[in-house]
Amino acid sequence: MSQPPARNSGRHRGQGRATGHGGPSGSARRAALAAQIRRTGIATAVVSTLGIVMINTTGIAHSEPVVIPGLRTAGTVADPASGGVADAATDRLSDPALLGQQRDDAARRQAQADRVDRDEALAQLSILLLQQRTTATESARQQEELRWVSPIQARLTQHFGGANGHPGIDLGAPMGTPVVAAHGGIIIYAGWESGYGNFVQIQHANNVVTCYAHLSRISVRVGQQVATGQQVGLEGSTGFSTGPHLHFEVRLGGQNGTKIDPLAWLARHNVSY
Ligand SMILES: [Zn+2]
């Protein structure tokens, strides 16, 4: 391990002496040439490659070829008669003007490409933003179309069906609690209905109808458009009722359609009691 540093320092001293004298000897010229070539990456690579060849052909230990094969290679590279790869490699790397020009050209091409990319990206972004805004508006509209709410803040006092075939659910709350449209639609009935008392029916999309019975007050009229959550009346105990509650029904297939379990329907629309 102590051998390579000793050899290196010896070589540096040799080079110093060689440059110091006016007429460099053959070995000093080779040393200077080697030093010059070793300053460039590719020349070093060439030296290393040739060094490896030397290792393979001569069997010199891997710590050795740094000095001897390197110097021999330097002579070979510097010989004009040899020409070839080494010369081309040295020319390219040792011409700063050519390198600079190549770098400038590459930078100009890159800058232009970047400008084109940026313009295209901006155009794409504008289109995306426009599409996103349209989609957001459309999405909000669709979400509102799908949104259902509780028709009243109350607790479930009677389920759908059962022994008596209850046609809806009963939702108990203090007298006068606001009753709202569980979903947006058009009022198709607003008045007295036998058994139901003060009664409101709303027609929704797909022929779905919701019914609100036993109201103490009706605050909408037939033909009126109501939004989801808009008040339609006040809870009460009119008609066949034993106490203040909202009797709520969901009918499929129109005003006199099939009565289904409102609890299940509401649950499917993210409303629960
Ligand atoms: Zn009921």
Image (tube, helix red, strand yellow):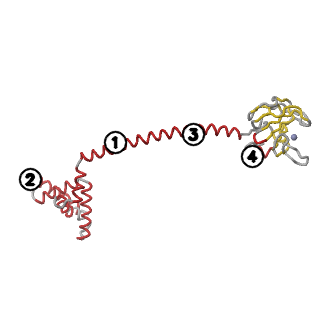
Q: Nearer the viewer, mark 3 or mark 4?
A: 3
**Which of the marked residues, 1 or 3, is nearer the chain's N terminus?**
1
The three-letter code of the residue at mark 4 reads Arg
Up-down: is 150 above or below 30?
A: above
Element assignment for label 2: loop
**Which of the marked residues, 3 or 2, is nearer the chain's N terminus?**
2
Tell me the quarter of the picture where residue 47 sits: bottom left
The three-letter code of the residue at mark 1 reads Arg
**Which of the marked residues, 3 or 4, is nearer the chain's N terminus?**
3
Element assignment for label 1: helix
Q: CA distance from mark 1 to mark 3?
A: 34 Å
Q: Label 2: which residue?
A: 21
Tell me the quarter of the picture where residue 64 sits: bottom left
Q: CA distance from mark 3 to mark 4?
A: 30 Å
Q: Label 4: which residue?
A: 268
Q: Position of residue 27 (x, y in %)?
A: 12, 60
Of the numbered discs in the image, which one, if any, rests on residue 108? 1
Q: CA distance from mark 4 to mark 1?
A: 61 Å
Q: Label 3: which residue?
A: 131
**Which of the marked residues, 1 or 2, is nearer the chain's N terminus?**
2
Q: Position of residue 268 (x, y in %)?
A: 74, 46
Q: CA distance from mark 4 to mark 2?
A: 99 Å
Q: Residue at x 11, y 59 (%)?
A: 26
Tell me the quarter of the picture where residue 169 sits: top right
Q: Nearer the viewer, mark 4 or mark 1?
A: 1
The three-letter code of the residue at mark 2 reads His
Q: Nearer the viewer, mark 4 or mark 2?
A: 4
**Which of the marked residues, 4 or 1, is nearer the chain's N terminus?**
1
